[in-house]
Amino acid sequence: MILLASPCANSQTGAQAIQQTTDQSVKCAYTAQEAASFLRAEEFAAVVLDQLLLDAEPEEAEQLLEHLGGATPVYVNFAIHGVERVARQVRAAMQRRKMQQEGARVYVQRAFRSELSETVTAMLLSCDMALSMRGVPAAAQEKLRTLHDLARELSARLNQTS
């Protein structure tokens, strides 16, 4: 969902254009206080902020910006730009957000895979050392071999998805 914060009369038209361009529902707020209350109550993918609203209510606008959370802010000026241009700006911001999220997801997956791989390698080395020791009971050796085989299988799966 997208939040549109603008005191302009044509903000409803802008909301419709944004909704058509992004295929996301749009909620309108006509004051910074109203927008901040929406942000406290719900999660938004983007918040479209009309410069007129920010300039007219600077203190309230600052509080509004503190409540953005994970929403992508898109600064527009309905007094200068047409609704189609604003809708294109929002679509571009949403595409940038999607690319950034995908990049972050890939980074986290790689980091997790790397950490997991290090742990599996340590398990394999520990199993190898324990199996090479003399005097280890046969039942313990069997459990260590099973653990070693499982760790090797996990390592192979980690290497396949790299």
Image (cartoon, rainbow, N blue to C red):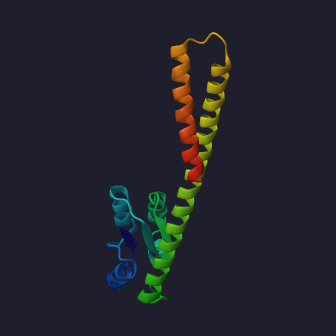
Q: Horizontally, is 42 left or right of 155 in the view?
A: left
Q: Position of residue 130 (x, y in %)?
A: 64, 20
Compare residues 8 and 21 and report the one nearer the observer: 21
Compare residues 122 and 88 and report the one nearer the observer: 122
Compare residues 120 and 160 and report the one nearer the observer: 160
**Is residue 77 shown to the viewer in this render?**
no
Q: Position of residue 51 (x, y in %)?
A: 49, 77
Determine the image quadrant of residue 78: bottom left
Determine the residue positioned at 32% across, 73% down: 25
Determine the residue positioned at 66% across, 12% down: 134
Q: Position of residue 141 (x, y in %)?
A: 56, 19
Q: Position of residue 101 (x, y in %)?
A: 51, 62
Determine the image quadrant of residue 15: bottom left
Determine the residue positioned at 48% across, 88% down: 81
Q: In the displayed structure, would residue 124 be above or below residue 32?
A: above
**Is residue 150 shown to the viewer in this render?**
yes
Q: In the displayed structure, would residue 115 be above or below residue 147?
A: below
If the image is split into quadrants, where does the N terminus sit?
bottom left
Compare residues 42 and 109 and report the one nearer the observer: 109
